[in-house]
Image (cartoon, helix red, strand yellow):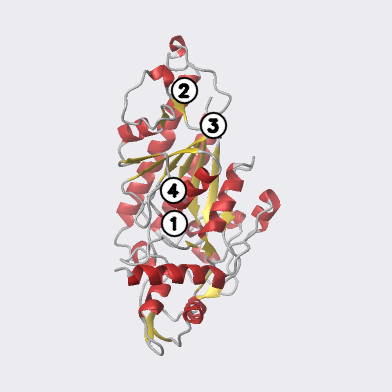
Amino acid sequence: MSDYKKTALVLGAGGFIGSHMVKRLRSEGYWVRGVDLKYPEFSGTEANEFVQGDLRDVDFVRRVIQFKGYSGNFYNEVPYKYIEPFHEIYQFAADMGGAGFVFTGENDAEIMQNSVTINLNVLEQQRLLDETFDGKQGWSECNRPVLDFRTKIFYSGSACMYPEHNQLDPDNPDCREDSAYPAAPDSEYGWEKLFSERLYLAYNRNHGIPVRIARYHNIFGPEGTWEGGREKAPAAICRKVAYARKNDTIEVWGDGEQTRSFLYVDECIEATRRLMDSDFMGPVNIGSEEMVSINQLVDTAAKVAKKTIEKNHIDGPLGVRGRNSNNDLIREKLGWDYSQTLEEGIRKTYKWIQEQIKNQ
């Protein structure tokens, strides 16, 4: 018998949200295998086992979704009859970034190909593994154990899949879950997120794979990308303000009146865990309802930094005019709501980015 509560496979464990999820699961007593192309950039992994590899490689995915025991033996061969599925899979792996990467149009094909390939590989290889326990592939003679569970897969979708026509008014965007159709995302990234969401639902419907689907709204916090072009708005603004002197001017894309809501990463992890522990499949929004303009986001970072900052509005990729999470459904189904203000989250994020700058 093991002392571990359950087993979990975290895909994208070297990234921002994935690395935070690994920490949370380990604190809850899970045995965790983390998978990514790279190790976490800003801290060591807390996974019991971390495997580097490319999830676009179908043979790698076939092997990485197999749980071979608690000793961390991905690279060791064991008799097939001892292989089991993981209890839970968290699928965060994707080709993604901030507006400077997603909305230029220059990376559309790469984003769509990479992310769709990963999701297809994960679902199909899990389906095939499940069938070995159903006796459909001739493994019954291998004395396969009788399992009292089926692997539950979480998919991290995005609010970018909501139709552009519902997000033209910066003061009144409509991002209720049932507003997703007729579909008309404003980017290929959003279309990919919508397709992959439907892909997970189809595998649930046709093959019985338990899935949970969230639509994330602008998750931010420490240990996320903060420079290089793929960072999200809160990190980019905090970086610019941190580098600025008092009364300096920083660049802001557009007129700064485009609106968004931003959710601190710890709150995202809590909501995701509640979703996984529930009987509710989703899709469901996970976000904050504290909507602010980008100009107000700059003002918040400046307040935290105790600096007076001027804004120079320049041309740049903007995305939709307004977007805000609607949490009616998640409050109803899971009893969850965000609890931290934007300023509280920015304060923690700004402090962390300051430390990164000092350590350069």
Residue at image point 29% right, 62% down: 106
Tag 3: residue type? Answer: Asp
| Three-letter amino acid code of the residue under disc 2 | Glu
SS at mark 2?
Answer: helix
Task: Please tell me which of labels 4 and 2 falls first in the chain.
Answer: 4
Q: Nearer the viewer, mark 3 or mark 4?
A: 3
Q: Residue tagged by mark 3?
A: 3
Could you classify mark 3 by the number of other residues whose Cα lies within 10 Å: few (under 14), some (14-19), or many (20 or more)? Answer: few
Q: Which mark is residue 190?
A: 1
Q: Earlier in the sequence, mark 1 or mark 3?
A: 3
Task: Report helix, strand or loop for mark 3.
Answer: loop
Against 75, residue 338 (above or below) is: below
Q: Which residue is tagged 2?
A: 131
The image shows residue 346 at horizontal and vertical percentages of 50, 71
Element on which disc 4 rests:
loop
Whether residue 242 sits left or right of residue 323 in the image: it is: left
User: Looking at the picture, which amino acid does disc 1 mark?
Assistant: Gly
Task: Give the mark nearer the N terminus: 3 vs 2.
Answer: 3
Query: Where's residue 144, x and y in %?
Result: 47, 16
CB of mark 3 within 8 Å of CB of mark 2? Answer: no
The quarter holding residue 170 reads bottom right
- Mark sitting on residue 92: 4
Tag 2: Cα neighbours inside 10 Å, few (<14), some, or many (≥20)? some
Residue 53 screen position, x and y as percent: 30, 41
- Where residue 155 appears, as percent x and y from the top left, is 49, 45
The answer, for residue 169, to whether it is visible in the render is no
| Mark 4 neighbour class, 10 Å CA radius: few under 14, some 14 to 19, many 20 or more | many
Q: Looking at the picture, tell me which residue is in the foreground, 213 or 172.
A: 213
Q: Residue at x 49, y 62 (%)?
A: 218
Question: Which mark is in front, 3 or 2?
Answer: 3
Q: Height in image: 176 above or below 290?
A: above
Q: Alpha carbon of mark 3 to alpha carbon of mark 4: how far?
A: 27 Å
